């Protein structure tokens, strides 16, 4: 994987898949990412696939395009992230939280 500089990363998209790590079909989700990239004409790259503490899957993508908070939320939902998590994210955005998109263990 090509190493990106911080200047090239404008947006991080965090996905929480409620699928057990051992049953996760990365190809299926990669195809979904490719379709979104094609429709929107943007570059999205996976930089982290991780097993969550609960045994499911966390994925982080980066883009060299800046997206607003609501656009990030929409992308996360479109890409199949846990809908309950995204509902809470929407509530945090509406309440003005600047740190609304927490996903990975230990992230502040």
Image: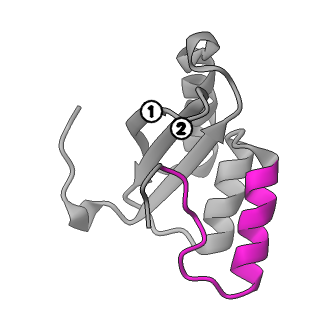
**Toward the viewer: 41 or 23?**
23
Quarter in which the C terminus is drawn: bottom left
Q: Element at badge 1?
A: strand
Which span is picked out in magenta? 84-104
Tag 1 residue: 50
Tag 2 residue: 58
> What's the residue at 38%, 66% (across, down)?
10
Residue occupying the far bottom of the picture:
96
Position above or below: 63 against 92? above
On the image, which quarter does residue 22 sit in?
Answer: top right
Q: Element at badge 2?
A: strand
Tell me which label, 2 or 1, sits earlier in the chain.
1
Instruction: Estimate the spatial distance between the alpha carbons at disc 2 and disc 1, rounded to whole Å.
Output: 5 Å
**Toward the viewer: 99 or 52?**
52
Q: Are marks 2 and 1 in contact (CB under 8 Å)?
A: yes
On the image, which quarter does residue 44 sit in?
Answer: top left
Assess disc 1: are there few (<14), some (14-19) or many (≥20) residues with their C-alpha within 10 Å of its C-alpha. Answer: some
Coordinates of residue 27 in the picture (x, y in percent): 55, 16
> What's the residue at 79%, 74% (across, down)?
91
Q: Is residue 1 left or right of residue 75?
A: left
Display coloring: one colour
Is residue 46 covered in magenta? no
Q: Mark number for residue 5?
A: none
> What's the residue at 45%, 32% (across, down)?
50
Coordinates of residue 38 in the picture (x, y in percent): 57, 39
> What's the residue at 61%, 72% (across, down)?
69
Assess disc 2: are there few (<14), some (14-19) or many (≥20) residues with their C-alpha within 10 Å of its C-alpha. Answer: many
Coordinates of residue 11 in the picture (x, y in percent): 44, 63
Position above or below: 42 against 38? below
**Toward the viewer: 14 or 2?**
14
Coordinates of residue 20 in the picture (x, y in percent): 64, 20
């Amino acid at each position: 994987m090509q190493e990106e500089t911080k200047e090239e990363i404008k947006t991080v998209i965090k996905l929480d898949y409620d699928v057990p790590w051992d049953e996760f079909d990365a190809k299926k989700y990669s195809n979904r990412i490719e379709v979104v990239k094609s429709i929107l004409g943007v570059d999205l790259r996976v930089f982290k696939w991780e097993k969550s503490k609960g045994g499911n899957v966390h994925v982080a993508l980066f883009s060299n395009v800046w997206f607003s908070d609501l656009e990030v939320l929409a992308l996360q939902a479109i890409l199949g992230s846990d809908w309950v998590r995204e509902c809470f994210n929407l509530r945090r955005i509406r309440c003005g939280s600047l740190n609304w998109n927490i996903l990975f263990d230990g992230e502040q």
